[in-house]
Amino acid sequence: MGMCLDVGNPRNNGDRVQLRQCLGNVNQVLSWYGDKLVIRNTR
């Protein structure tokens, strides 16, 4: 099992998020894209 953020709804600064197990062996990676933090899946 990989780890995923519990995202789904838009997040605002200061929101608390949790890492949870994903379905399948996928890990999510956070990276900066300009001034936004984006999530992408890796295997």
Image: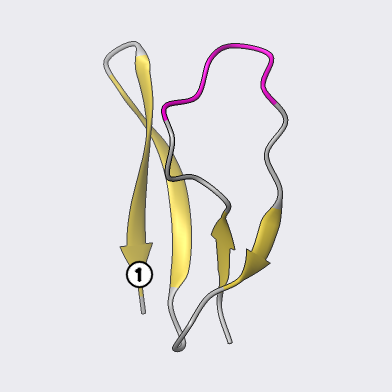
Magenta stretch prevailing secondary structure: loop
Residue occupying the far left of the picture: 34
Residue 11 among those drawn in magenta: yes
What residue range appears in magenta? 10-15
Specify whether 12 is left or right of 42.
right
Q: Is residue 21 above or below residue 12?
A: below
Q: Is residue 14 highlighted in magenta?
A: yes
Q: Is disc 1 placed on a helix, strand or loop?
A: strand
Q: Quadrant of residue 2?
A: bottom right
Instruction: Say whether residue 29 is left or right of residue 15.
Output: left
Tell me: residue 34, above or below residue 6.
Answer: above
**Mark 1 neighbour density, 10 Å: few (under 14) some (14–19) many (20 or more):** few
Residue 33, given in percent of the width and then of the height, sits at 28, 25
Q: Is residue 37 left or right of residue 22?
A: left
> Which image quadrant: the N terminus?
bottom right
Q: Which residue carries the number 1 mark?
A: 42
Look at the image and tell me in which quarter the C terminus lies.
bottom left
